[in-house]
Amino acid sequence: MSQAVITEPSSPRTKRLKARLLESPYSLDIERARYYTRAWKRAEAAGPCRKAAAGLAEALATMTIRIEDDELLVGVRSNKRRGGVIAVEKGTFNGQVEVFADPYSHPSLRTAVGGATSARAEQFARSISADEAREWSEEILPYWQERTAGWLKRKMIEAAGVFKGPVKLGPWAWIKIYRGLGGLKGITDTIARNKSEAPPPKATKAEAVPWKKPGGIQALRQAIAGIAGARSKLQDVLPDLMYMSLGVQGHTIPGYKRVLAMGFKGIGEWAEKELAELDPADKDYEHRKDFYASVSQAAKAVCAYAQRYAALAEEMSVKAPEPRKSELLEIAERCRRVPAEPPATFLEAIQAMWMTQVVLEISYGLDNIFSPGRVDQYLYPFYQADLEAGRITRAQALEAIEEYLIKAADSYVHGPNNMTVGGVGRNGEDSTNEVSFLFLEGFENIKGLGSTLAARISPKAPREFLLKALKVHRATGGIAFYNDAIVIRDLLEDGFSLEDARDFGIIGCVEPTSGGNCFSYTAGNGIMMLGALEMALNRGRRVLGDDTIVGVKTPDPTTFKSFDEVKDAFAKQLGYIVAHAVQAAELKDKAYAEAFPCLLLSSTIEGCLESGKDVTCGGAKYNHGHVNAQALASVANSLAAIKWAVFDEKIVTLEELVRHLRHNFKGAENLRQKLIHQAPKFGNDDPRADEIAAWVAEVLTRETRQHRSWRGGVYRPSLFSSGTQHIEGAFIGATPDGRLATEVVSNGVSPANGTEKKGMTAVFHSVAAAAKSYLSDGTALNLNLSPSLLKTERGVEKFADLILAYFEMGGRQVQFNPLDKATLKDAQAHPEKYPDLTVKVTGYSAIFVDLSQPLQEDIIARTEFSET
């Protein structure tokens, strides 16, 4: 068993901060929900912008603040460590009323927050006091029942009449689904807690209908609803789990550059100037008036919030001994200046960035919506000036960056998650600098802590930057590599200017976008591509559903005479799914524009103060929609298997194959093994599969990019998973690649687990060939590495050449888990030994021991490459 290299934070201070974080349990916090509810009640008759500003002002003036020992950067989004604010007005957590009312029994808690393990779920549950549970159930939630964004979205969807409602699944289908997720014990426990007398399921035949007694199937349905991805029952999954539009708009990169350039005081003054100059004859006068007045109120609230920390630090300094007394006084002085004023020093700049992150998350109500973007570019001018003036040393800057990274990891979902370093500048010059290296070093020292660092690699990048990023993998996972040339090419296709395309950062999992000038949010609208193939083989029906046609009605597959007819049916189903996902997204976006503006974010985004419009209303310079898919390999392998088995080798007819799929290969195990082991598989540099994968990606790209957002931009396609490969697989029957019903599907553009047999170079060839389309919203390629590959300097050099060759072929992105299976299995068995073991899940990173067992098993099952 090979473990990662042992690294530690660079100073005793950041070592203590990291230890304190890891020792803290995860928690839920209702403070923000409490104060937003109070403010909205008082502002009931006001416009949407005024209510949003009132809620933020109330929260920032009233929420608990604290400054802990050793901290130099201050600002908390929750009154609890590893706590999270709840966006009650978004409706994201409506399904958790039972969590608060009975926090030890709610079945969806394990999956409602980041795919949590049972132990982590229990921490969430125990963080809610009896008084908080009562307040949530009796005072907060009743007010929002018909006022949330989720409720308004559903109302609009129902009025539009475009969806039929969720597919109907019978009891046996529900059992198969949950077995596929490995959750039978959780269901048994749920039934026991609900005091049901029903036994756990033992049926093995479709005719059996267990759990007829009260509480059984109801508990199972409730649990699946929590897993289904909307955190709010099946009503948020539209219409049949083939396409989902969740109740949030995320992710994006706020305008940190604007905050650093003018501060929130300057932003507020800008809004007030625009307000004073408004023309009452303007047809949008009332909206702009509401917007500018509300931005002014929000900016003042942020400045006052920072002053609360200044006062607290000064108060604490009275009783503090040296050197802490001086540190607290310095904190007070920084908070008096930033983020109200433009920062003058490196420490002020990083404090301003962190405080901005905190208030934006409080404003929106979630901790994983905003990514910082190009942190090295923001901070380098301040670092350079301080270094030259003798105000800071490299060691002090590194310590501050480590604290910033630790604070970013102090979250209950994934926090900011992605920060970007390296790449070219706006004029095309290499912009890698000393702060780029400091972030790599700091990330290595703290071992990532579940965060992600995106390393941009251009042809102009210094080789030592790539080598350093690879060496970080000796200590931890969490770094992903991006090909500047391809990403910039894609963003130009989206309509970004060349300068703005060059200035991209990575947000969320793997999604590139220009920073501080767009609302091209990249998460929340997902489709199930493998389901499109299932419907193509069943005339628009779902195998695990009833006989209802939920897709477009395509011909009976028994009439297909060629593989092209199969492809045509698939393309039609995929186009249908994409179109409906866009419809759901457009209605969601209109619900936000109507009633749920993002004032504070808008005040930082280029275009909004200029136009007097919130980002939700199209005020940003750039506006795009997005459609996300995964399972490229599962789809390509299945189509390749059909071509190979039915039309080339003729070992089975399509009619026979479809029948075997409907019966989950019962009585056809010999055929299934041939499909698994002999049919072409994506990831082996085999054109029989790779060309099909490229065609699937092209269809997804074409069908997505033909749609435009009502806010102005094109819809952008992506191929990455947010950890939902188990969820998607759970609702799909057996597939032609030999996969059984409810089993996991492949993630992103990665080969299906265990199917890549010819080494990493072959994988790179396949992925580069398949993902040439304008997949501008990002792709995720996940690979497990044997730690021995990077053990020597020569190994690192060879691996750097391999990545550069992959990028030269057109590869867009790649990320690695540098951990062997023995280490991962040991972490599963002994989580206490691995509190900071960071892994790449899909696009995002996480601490391995905090993941649910199905996600852990998926990571372990990935092929471990010990040579290229």
Image (cartoon, helix red, strand yellow):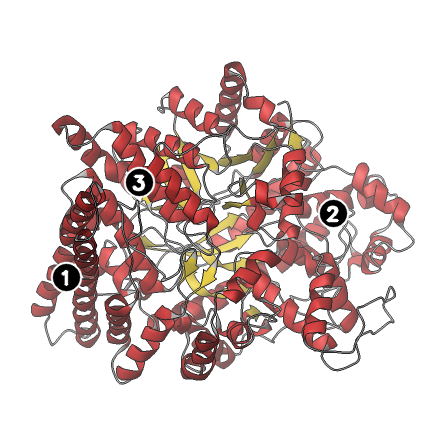
Q: Horizontal placement of 11 versus 804: left or right? A: left
Q: Looking at the rendered structure, which numbered label has been put on residue 268?
A: 1
**Front disc: 3 or 2:** 3
User: Where's the C terminus, which quadrant?
Assistant: top right
**SS category of the residue bearing label 3:** helix
Q: CA distance from mark 3 to mark 2?
A: 49 Å
Q: Is residue 47 visible?
A: yes
Q: Which residue is mark 2?
A: 563
**SS category of the residue bearing label 2:** helix
Residue kind at label 2, given as amino acid type = Phe
Image point 54% across, 74% down: which residue?
162
Q: Horizontal placement of 40 versus 247: left or right? A: left
Looking at marks 2 and 1 on the same chain, the residue that comes earlier in the sequence is marked by 1
User: Where's the N terminus, which quadrant?
Assistant: top right
Could you say where residue 661 lies in the image, as x and y percent from the top left?
A: 81, 56
Image point 34% across, 28% down: which residue?
437
Residue kind at label 1, given as amino acid type = Gly
**SS category of the residue bearing label 1:** helix
Q: Horizontal placement of 56 versus 698: left or right? A: left
Looking at marks 3 and 2 on the same chain, the residue that comes earlier in the sequence is marked by 3
Could you say where residue 274 lies in the image, as x and y percent from the top left?
A: 11, 64
Q: CA distance from mark 2 to mark 1?
A: 61 Å
Residue kind at label 3, given as amino acid type = Val
Quarter of image, res 76: bottom left
Q: Residues within 10 Å of mark 3 (few under 14, many from 20)?
A: many
Q: Residues within 10 Å of mark 1 (few under 14, many from 20)?
A: many
